[in-house]
Image (tube, helix red, strand yellow):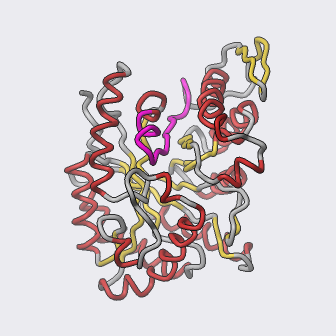
Amino acid sequence: MSAIDSNVRVSLFLTNQQVCGKDQVTAFQGQLELCKQVRDAGWDGVFVGQHHLSEGLSHLQSAPVLGRLAVEAGGMRLGIGISLLALHNPVDLAETYATIDVLCGGRLIFGVGLGYRDVEYQAFGIQNGERVRRFEANLEVILALWSGEAVTADLPWCRLESQRLSLVPVQRPRPQVWMAANSDAAVRRAARLADAWMINPHATRATIERQLRLYRDSRLEAGRPEIPSELPAMREVFCASSRERAKELAGPYLGAKYEAYSRWGQDKVLPGDESFSVPIDRLAEDRFIVGTPDDCLSTLVKWRDELGVNHFVIRTDWAGMPTEATAGSIRLLTDEVIPELRCS
């Protein structure tokens, strides 16, 4: 068993997703201000996500957003959480994210995932039975290209004959690859192929605790250290002066986010019989962290001490939420939660 890094890191997941009809320019300026806020407060990174054809929501695409964030991020790491790897050409992805690693000075985290929305796969002409094959093959090609060596690939969607990239990432041998996983099969895949499993925010702690055992066992079976040095978890967190105030400010937007997830079928790829079609208070149980600084700290410390998480990717902003409400949550997390969370 490898020794897990005891230094706790905290990153912000920026919402590059907004309600349709909102002024996107103003909304993105708000996201830039949040990026600057966490940079100046000493947070460790910022992440953005990716979707296509986001029904009911509009979604700025991740690569150009990360390029813009690189200007403001200072020394923070930049992460894609996640790139829908199977949908895209691996040469394009390899060059695009090598470019982003250059723009941010070698601080990219390359998060990847299979995704779950049929509409996205249909739009790119990919059949159900091809998804996992394309995902794994694309990752293999990207990592080979990033090595700088000549690569040969004979795939229906990508053919290379002893080709090499003239632009490789700053980080050598490459940026870290974090893999999102919801199902047990995907957790085993992350254990086998990625540097770290990026633990999702959707499942309950009980599910994650069971899957962590599966993850560690699967890494050992693959001949890898039981746990990686960095174990990241994305969490839905909102901090306010009281529990009632936190629910008042976050509830409508967090609830709307999971209503969208329910429409999109996110809960259908979770193990067991979980459903997001329930009232927000019930949905929040053992899943979200919405409350006072003490509430947030006590829950996050348990994830740190009992599950071994040492990189928290916090989403404290959801589509439509006023920037000032998010900024208030970030201030409380910065002043009253993160310093204690970083104490070993």
Q: Is residue 197 left or right of residue 209?
A: right
Residue nearer the viewer, 7 or 110: 110
* Quarter of the rendering occupied by the N terminus: top left
Picture coordinates of residue 118, whole percent (x, y): 66, 52
Query: Does the magenta portion include 306?
Result: no
Indicate left or right for 234 with 1 as reference.
Answer: right
Residue 176 vs 27, above or below: the answer is above
Kindly identify the residue that appears in the image at 48 percent across and 76 percent down: 255
Residue plotted at (62% across, 34% down): 135
Task: Give residue 69's quadrant in the image.
Answer: bottom right
Residue 37 position, x and y percent, is 50, 68
Apparent side of residue 198 relative to residue 71 in the rendered image (left or right): left
Q: Is residue 301 visible?
A: yes
Query: What residue is at 67 percent from the left and 70 percent from the top?
Result: 57
Q: Classify 40 as above or below 175.
A: below
Location of residue 213 by image quarter: top left
- Is residue 43 in sight in this rendering? no
Where are the magenta residues, as a range? 172-188
* Residue 182, position as x, y percentages in the image: 45, 48
Between 40 and 101, the residue placed more toward the observer is 101
Where is 207 relative to 315, above or below? above
Number of dots carrying numbers = 0
Q: Residue at x 64, y 66 (%)?
A: 17
